Structures are given as structure tokens and as C-alpha cells.
Amino acid sequence: MVPRKGIFAGDDPFEITRSWLKEAEAKEVNDPNAIAIATVDPEGLPNVRMVLLKEIADDAFVFFTNYESAKGQEIESAGKAAFVMHWKSLRRQVRVRGLVSRESEEASDAYYKSRALGSRIGAWASQQSRPLSSKSALLETVAREGLKHGPNPKRPPFWGGYRISPLEIEFWADGEFRLHDRFRWRRSAPDQPWDIQRLNP
């Protein structure tokens, strides 16, 4: 069953997500591309945090981070992650679960170069997720890395993109009396066809 009417119309879940995000960009005050991404540590304890989704490709969702951060280490270990993108203004959300791989070096380089210089230097300076003695210590490191790398720093080898290839995507839209609309797209592998089901709210 492929949803054909209303906000769920279409047979490509990536295109539906792009359409919803475009609508949200006109309504959300801050960061309509924010996602809460969940990973698990070696003991199976979940972690969740907000990051910015930077691309909805034809076959994956892409974000960028420090590979040595907690999320990076957990992704490298498990090879899997999940996220939810929620737009309160639209009363909609998209949930994704899937397999994770690193983005290409070329794509990571290109995105890194598009960032503000301060953010590029900050990527060199921050040992993300690890203990920090003080904010002043971080600022000192930022200044030192700025002098070291200059106005056109190369991308740190420990920083880059991840691609989430979904095995499951769920579209959720608010309904009156909490009778929400939910459609789940599921497949056994990234190269397999989607099975689509309407779910109870």
C-alpha cells in the first residue's frame, strides 16, 4: 500500500521528507533541520542528542560530527542509529532507523569548507564529549589552532559526515482526539523494496 493522498502522497519516502522539511523551513523559528539522534554504547545503554541534518540524499540522511565523539564512537561500534525529526509548528514528525556509514572524503571536505571559519577552527579545537577543565582552556585552544591552521584550514581527519541508510521510516501527523496518522516504510536491506503499512495511532 502506497499512500496517495494528502501530505503522505508519493512513493519515495526521501522526497516526502524533503517536502515536509521545506514546509517546516517556512514555519519553524530555529533549526527546522534539527534531529534527535540515538545511538547505544557497548553496554546497550542508549544515548540521544540533537544534531543538524545537512542533506536528504536519494538514499540516505547525512549529518556531520567529530568521529571521536561519544556518538561517533558508538556509531563506529554498532553501525546503526535512529533519529526523530519533530516539527511542533506542523504537528508532524519523521522517525528513521537504519545502518550508518561514513560519508565520502570528498563530500566531507566540501561541507567543511562551506562552514564559517570559526566553526572550522572549532572542529580542530574541541575534543568533543571529553572532559574540559574550563571554558578559558577551550578558548586558548581555539586561538592556538587558529594560528596553527590559518584562514584556510583543512578538514580534521577526525571530523566528517555520516550517512544513515534507513531500513525503516515512519511518517506521523497529528490527528484530532489523538487519532494520529502513521505510515511506516520498512525494508530488509537498503537495496530492497519498501513495504508500507498504516499503523494505529
Image (tube, rainbow, N blue to C red):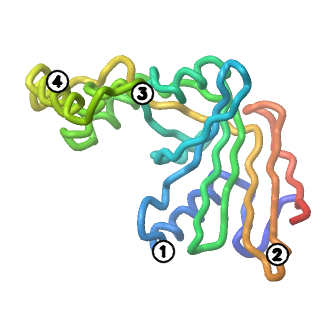
The reply to whether dot 3 and dot 2 touch (C-beta < 8 Å) is: no
Q: Amino acid at mark 1?
A: Lys
Instruction: Using the numbered discs, state the Cα–Cα distance from disc 3 to disc 1 in whole angstroms.
Output: 30 Å
Q: Amino acid at mark 3?
A: Asn
The reply to whether dot 2 and dot 1 touch (C-beta < 8 Å) is: no
Instruction: Using the numbered discs, state the Cα–Cα distance from disc 4 to disc 2 in whole angstroms.
Output: 52 Å
Instruction: Using the numbered discs, state the Cα–Cα distance from disc 4 to disc 1 in whole angstroms.
Output: 38 Å
Residue at horizontal 45 percent and vertical 46 percent from the top: 54
Q: Which residue is mark 2?
A: 178
Residue at horizontal 16 percent and vertical 24 percent from the top: 145
Q: Secondary structure at mark 3?
A: strand
First reached walking from the N terminus: tag 4 or tag 1: 1
The reply to whether dot 3 and dot 4 touch (C-beta < 8 Å) is: no
First reached walking from the N terminus: tag 2 or tag 1: 1
Q: Which residue is mark 1?
A: 27
* Left or right of 36 on screen, residue 154: left
In depth, the one of 41 and 101 nearer the eye is 41
Q: Amino acid at mark 4?
A: Glu
Q: Which residue is mark 4?
A: 145
Q: Secondary structure at mark 4?
A: helix
Q: Secondary structure at mark 2?
A: helix
* Left or right of 176 on screen, residue 145: left
Q: Which residue is mark 3?
A: 66
Q: Quadrant of the N terminus?
A: bottom right
The residue mark sitting in front, 2 or 1, is 2
In depth, the one of 86 and 4 nearer the eye is 86
Residue at horizontal 58 percent and vertical 66 percent from the top: 87
First reached walking from the N terminus: tag 3 or tag 2: 3
